[in-house]
Image: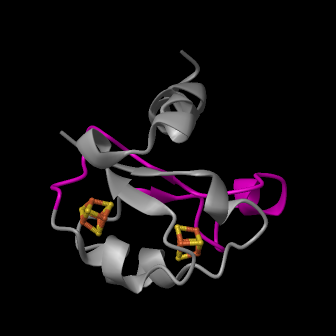
Amino acid sequence: MTHVIAAPCIGDKTCACVAVCPVDSIHPTPEEAAFEYEEMLYIDPESCIDCGLCVDECPKNAVFPDDELPDKWKPYRQRNSEYFKRLLGG
Ligand code: SF4
Ligand code: SF4
């Protein structure tokens, strides 16, 4: 399983989530070039350990365990993972 960032994050990017993630799964961070043009942040499903810390930290309630993702935001599961595939050139 993983956690997923959904639509409420779009346009926010306050990054409270980035600061609490113990395994650096949330990108792009403000230090990364992609931060300028990505409209939201994403969670790497390969490294997320499902600790849930980012859920409590997010002021927009944008983060969900993937099995609790509301139906209307199901596509965000793929959108999160695809961001990291794009980074790898896949
Ligand atoms: S997931 Fe939440 S805390 Fe993180 S950038 Fe998006 S809105 Fe902000
Ligand atoms: S659930 Fe934990 S490990 Fe996964 S992205 Fe959130 S803070 Fe990071």
Q: Residue at x 36, y 56 (%)?
A: 64
| Side (left or right) of 44 relative to 73 | left
Q: Residue 25 appears at what percent x and percent y?
A: 36, 57
Q: Main secondary structure of the magenta part?
A: loop
Question: Where is residue 36 drawn, in percent x and y?
Answer: 82, 62
- From the top left corner, tell me how far across and down residue 3 is, in percent: 31, 51
Rendering coords of residue 9 (x, y %)? 64, 63
* Image quarter of the N terminus: top left
Depth check: give the residue in front, 8 or 87.
8
The image shows residue 81, relative to residue 2, as above or below, that is: above
Residue 41 belongs to the span the image colors magenta = yes
Using residue 45 as the reference point, say whether residue 76 is left or right of it: right
State which region is magenta.
26-50
Tally the numbered discs.
0
Query: Residue visible at 64% across and 82% down?
Result: 14
The quadrant of the picture showing ligand 2 is: bottom left
Per the image, is 1 magenta?
no
In this rendering, is residue 60 above or below 51? Answer: below
Query: In percent of the image, x 56 and y 37: which residue is there?
Result: 72
In the drawing, does residue 73 fall left or right of residue 10?
left
* Lateral position of residue 57 relative to residue 52, left or right: right
Q: Residue furthest top?
A: 90
Relative vertical location of residue 73 with respect to residue 56 in this rendering, above or below: above
Q: Indicate whether 48 appears above or below 30.
A: above
Residue situated in front as seen by the camera: 67 or 4: 67
Q: Quadrant of the C terminus?
A: top right
